[in-house]
Image: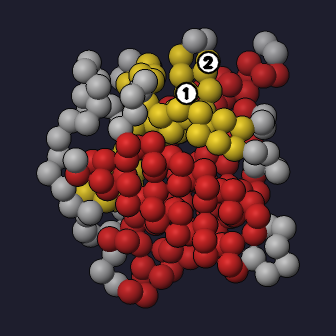
Amino acid sequence: MGIARRILLAMALAVTATLLVPATSASAAGQPVTICFRVGEFNGMPIFDCHTIVLPDFKPKPIGPDGCLSCPPVFDLWDQIHPKERVAYLDQLGRGLSLLGEAAQCGDPGKAAALRKLATESFLSSAKLLNGSAVKLAQVGWADLKNGKFYADPTPQPSLEASGQHLVAGLGLMQKSLLDVHPETSIKEAMARFDLAYKELGALFAG
């Protein structure tokens, strides 16, 4: 088995194991949802890295396409890095978004500030793991986790598309901060973009 094939198999096993662990949230408020990143493919099946995000309360309703109404949304990002590093940076990106959601829905200001700091660190870690690679939103879609399928969305919902674009912009600003002598401004601007990505996800699920 070649190196690339072994890496993809390890990715598939690791992501599958992650999906089998029940997600927990530090927040007592809000509505948990699942969002995914498309990592790659193994034996023709898509590999997803999925995360639980706590959004403002909303009335749950199907938002996926016909045949996959309950499927979580997917961000498919384009980059120029090795599959192994792709898993790492996407995981940190998802973790940051998850922590950002917990902070937004946390009723304790001190705890919320601590969670937001952790989110910032995760986003910075994601940017570092890109190793200078450009990144952009290739497409959005839906993950059929039960059947191992990816449904591309030829006419993406505006909120999902906007959320993905804000995530990419936030990553770019975090990458910029790594080169800045005084990175505070770029980090602040990046976090504003991640906040917008989170807000658009809330709009997507709330309808």
Viewer can see residue 32: no
Image location of residue 94, percent across then percent down: 53, 51
Judge from the rendering whether residue 189 lies leftward or rightward of residue 104; answer left or right: right
Circle on res. 77: none
The front one of 175 and 109 is: 175
Q: Is residue 170 above or below residue 164?
A: below
Judge from the rendering whether residue 82 lies leftward or rightward of residue 158; answer left or right: right
Location of the N terminus (image quadrant): top right
Circle on res. 42: 2
Quarter of the image where one finds residue 57: bottom left
Looking at the rendered structure, the number of numbered marks drawn on it comes to 2
Crowdedness of circle 2 by 10 Å Cα count: few (<14), some, many (20+)?
A: some
Judge from the rendering whether residue 101 lies leftward or rightward of residue 175; answer left or right: left
Viewer can see residue 141: yes
Crowdedness of circle 1 by 10 Å Cα count: few (<14), some, many (20+)?
A: many
Q: Could you tell me which residue is drawn at 66 percent across and 29 percent down?
A: 10
Q: Could you tell me which residue is drawn at 68 percent across and 63 percent down?
A: 173
Give the amino acid at mark 2. Answer: Phe
Image location of residue 199, percent across then percent down: 38, 60
Question: Which colour assignment does the render follow?
Answer: secondary structure
Decide: marks 1, 2 in contact (CB < 8 A)? yes
Q: Earlier in the sequence, mark 1 or mark 2?
A: 2
Image location of residue 137, percent across then percent down: 59, 40
